[in-house]
Amino acid sequence: MWDYEFQPSKKNYIHDLNIVPVLDMLVAVIFFLLLSTSFIGYTKLQVPPSSISAMTESPPIPPLNPQLMIFEKDNQYVIQLSWKGTDPAAQISRIAIADFETQHKVMVLRIKSMMENFAKKFPQEKTIQIGLETMVPFQVLVDAMDAVREKTPDVVLISYEGLALEAL
């Protein structure tokens, strides 16, 4: 009997309104309304009809892609400067592996002369790719980069593996 006095009466009890699902639904509806208004502009685009055009120019000239490869063969350093393009060719120079100072000077002079010949033939070319065999010392790479930088300021290092070398 006393329990009934402390319970709220059924007449005065108000149910709580859960508005979270209503807000979730409104957010989704607003999102889709915004998207649908942006797609209306895309349906009004006019694409011009396709047309056929004839090429009046000759095909582009293939790139030279000059490569300076240095590798070791038969106790010699082989320096190969090759290029592609309309007139592909290669220059090859061999230097005997000797003491460091002599080899250093000779290699720099040979690479410079090869680059001068290349620059006379192709004065517009400013990029060269340099690659070394794995057993060639790092100092040879530094020497080669210093030697080519006068004629071709853009030097790119490439991997030696997978390249076809004419001197082999």
Image (spheres, rainbow, N blue to C red):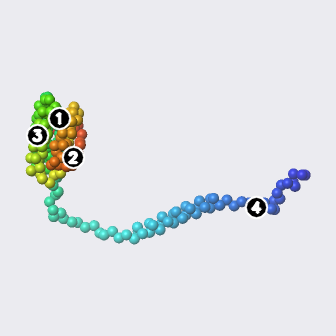
Q: How far apart are marks 2 and 3 (CA)?
A: 18 Å
Q: Distance between the residues labelled 1 and 4?
A: 91 Å
Residue projecting furthest to the right: 1
CA neighbours of label 4 inside 10 A, class few (<14), some (14 to 19), many (20+): few
Q: Residue 71: x percent and y percent?
A: 17, 35
Q: Which of marks 1 and 4 is in front?
A: 1
Task: Please give the residue where the numbered disc 4 appears in the rendered image.
Answer: 14
Q: Nearer the viewer, mark 3 or mark 1?
A: 3
Marked residue nearer the N-terminal end (1 or 4): 4
CA neighbours of label 2 inside 10 A, class few (<14), some (14 to 19), many (20+): some
Marked residue nearer the N-terminal end (2 or 1): 1
Task: Please give the residue where the numbered disc 1 appears in the rendered image.
Answer: 71
Task: Please give the residue where the numbered disc 2 appears in the rendered image.
Answer: 155
Q: Residue 156: x percent and y percent?
A: 23, 45
Marked residue nearer the N-terminal end (2 or 3): 3
Residue 154 horizontal side relative to residue 95, left or right: right
Q: Is residue 98 above or below residue 116?
A: above
Marked residue nearer the N-terminal end (4 or 3): 4
Task: Please give the residue where the numbered disc 3 appears in the rendered image.
Answer: 110
* Amino acid type at mark 4: Ile
Secondary structure beneath dot 4 equals loop
* Amino acid type at mark 1: Phe
The answer to whether mark 1 and mark 4 are in CB contact below 8 A is: no
Q: Residue 34: x percent and y percent?
A: 50, 66
The answer to whether mark 2 and mark 1 are in CB contact below 8 A is: no
Secondary structure beneath dot 2 equals strand
Residue 86 horizontal side relative to residue 40, left or right: left
Residue 18 horizontal side relative to residue 72, left or right: right
Q: Distance between the residues labelled 2 and 1?
A: 18 Å
Secondary structure beneath dot 1 equals strand
